[in-house]
Image: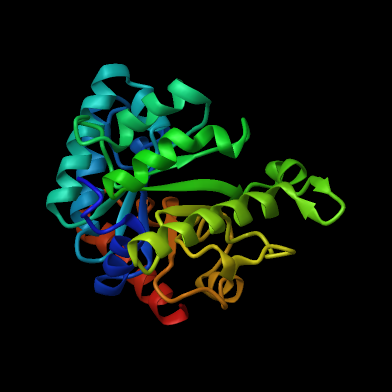
Amino acid sequence: MGEQHQGFGDRLASAIGLTSPLCAGIDPSSALLGQWGLTDDAAGLATMARTVVAASAGVAAAIKPQVAFFERFGSAGYAVLEEVIALASDAGLLVVIDAKRGDIGTTMEAYGEAWLDDRSSLAADALTVTSYLGIDAMEPVFDLARASGRGLFVVVASSNPEGRALQEAKISPTMSIEQSLLADLGRRNRAEIASTQCAFGSLGAVVGATRSAGQLDLASLAGPYLVPGVGAQGATPEDVATLFAHCSPRSVLVNASRSILSAGPDEGAVRAAAESLATELTRAL
């Protein structure tokens, strides 16, 4: 890619407009593979992943493979992941890699080259990252995302309750860690918008649907949101609509994994589950 290409925020908004706000998660746990009657190995992994891609095409804006469930099978699992990325791209789906990488300097740059660089067979449309070694340490991967037309989703306010003590911790009397992260991402996105005339920046935020907005100014991001927590974790499309009521249309991508995967192994049943949730999300948002 290159700077002449449309940025990730705008590409995602277009994909949501053409399909729905749904992001179909691919989380092939041992339990789910067994539920599908598949072997707990790379062959079973491949069957489930191919089925989800086929069922999601034309229904979801994106898929989100969780890297942990692929890398547990070593190089064979990564080979399946490479195949899934290529299949999804051919099917018109954006690919958000859920790897939550986070480090400093050249290490962060190398993560970016693995997941965001055209030269890599693992290159996807966006990558999830954590910035708890300092958001300025993410600069190499921020730069690569913008230059390649790809995106990042930075964990800001996760859906799991264990993360709240850290994310809501105060770094000043008036500012929490999650507020600071969101404000920093918003500043970077607005600078990108000013320089490229895009509608949305490339830097997104992960904010769980089970969270309340609290003191977060969600409308200030000027970029996309990746929203876990719908379905098996208890949140509803209406919860998402309430939480992101003041955000721009087509800026919210809602992930669902188990609520869709549990409909398998039949591809038609998985597609029906995805279509049902996609319709609910479109109506709510």
Depth check, front residue: 2 or 69: 2
In the figure, residue 199 lies in which quadrant?
Answer: bottom left
Q: Name the residue furthest front.
A: 195
Residue 224, position in %: x, y? 45, 61
Q: Is residue 208 above or below residue 200?
A: above
Which residue is found at the position 42% from the left and 36% from the top? Answer: 141
Residue 258, position in %: x, y? 43, 50
- Colour scheme employed for the rendering of this structure: rainbow
Kindly tell me whether residue 281 is visible in this rendering.
yes
Q: Name the residue furthest top.
A: 74
Q: Is residue 129 above or below residue 244?
A: above
Q: Quadrant of the N terminus?
A: top left
Instruction: Report whether 60 appears left or right of 152.
Output: left
Q: Name the residue furthest right.
A: 173
Instruction: Report whether 23 appears left or right of 49.
Output: right
Residue 243, position in %: x, y? 60, 71
Kindly tell me whether residue 96 is visible in this rendering.
no
Which residue is found at the position 30% from the left and 51% from the top? Answer: 264
Depth check, front residue: 52 or 228: 228
How many labels, in total? 0
In the figure, residue 207 lies in which quadrant?
Answer: bottom right
Residue 201, position in %: x, y? 42, 59
Which residue is found at the position 21% from the left and 26% from the top? Answer: 79
Q: Is residue 227 above or below residue 278?
A: above
Q: Name the residue furthest bottom.
A: 283
In the figure, residue 85 lies in which quadrant?
Answer: top left
